[in-house]
Amino acid sequence: MGSATTQALAATETALRAASGIDLGVARELFAAARALGESSQLSGALADSAASPAARTKVVTDVFGGFQPTTVSLLTTAVAQRWSSSADLVTGIEELAVRAASISDAAVDVEGELFRFSRTVAENPELELALGSRLGDDSAKGALVETLLAGRASAPTTLIVSSLVQQPRERRVRQVLDRAMAVVSDQRGRSVATVVSAAPLSDTQLERLTTALSKRYGAQVSINTLVDPTVVGGLRVQIGDDVIDASVSTRLHDLRQRLAG
């Protein structure tokens, strides 16, 4: 990611925090705008062209997306007024803005957890991953499939995020897209997400203690996604971003065998 895009993302995030009336409708319109730009290199190129005046780019936004809510148009105007490293980065930036808006629309929903659970469903079902990730499949059909799968199982914000993202993978794997969405939602909500692998399900008390310990260690609120893997035998394996804390029995046994062999 170029420095120009980094600064542009910061500017759009600031605009989102200052905006009022952020609801699921705004998020849906931002996803629609990202999809329109992703499908038209001419449009995305024109809006990402730093040589064009901000006024000219704003006019394009109002001409193309003038039927959207004023809040959506304002956010899009802010986005295209920035300098982006590439037109693809502009599309990604608006897409991430949509993910953030969806997470804001209902702060009480555990969007990160729901995205994680769907990601695990995809990982455990190769046929589903192929259906959602195939370049040959109909994009709207992929979105409809997600809506059917998540009906009654996930919130409206999560369903919107997943169904929108699978319709425009842009050379990205489905799980990669979902992982990025989880990271964006966590950042928007000012917390980190830990993936915890254990041999057996953790009790509520254990989860509470672990959450407290990790939050204290990282100096920020930490939410936990859990996986059960009997091969770890005992103990825990915790991953937060690039950090891995491996206190599993299987790893300790492996290390012991390595020392004895060596």
Image (cartoon, helix red, strand yellow):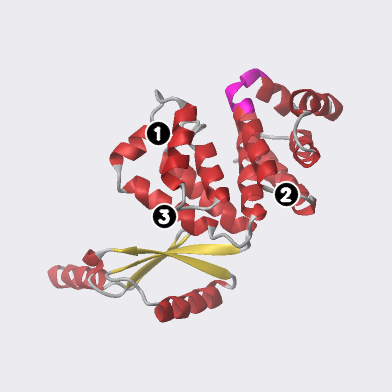
Classified by dominant secondary structure, the portion drawn in magenta counts as helix
Front position among marks 3 and 1: 3
Q: Earlier in the sequence, mark 2 or mark 3?
A: 2
Question: How many residues crowd mark 2 within 10 Å: few (<14), some (14–19), many (20+)?
Answer: some
Q: Position of residue 119 (x, y in %)?
A: 41, 49
The picture quadrant where one finds residue 231 is bottom left
Residue located beneath label 2 in the image: 22
Q: Secondary structure at mark 3?
A: helix
Q: Earlier in the sequence, mark 3 or mark 1?
A: 3
For the residues marked 2 and 3, what is the alpha-carbon distance in whole angstroms? 26 Å
Residue in view at x 83 percent, y 30 percent:
54
Q: Position of residue 115 (x, y in %)?
A: 47, 52
Question: How many residues crowd mark 3 within 10 Å: few (<14), some (14–19), many (20+)?
Answer: some
Amino acid type at mark 3: Arg
Amino acid type at mark 2: Ile
Amino acid type at mark 1: Gly
256 left or right of 204 in image = left
Front position among marks 2 and 1: 2
Residue located beneath label 3 in the image: 117
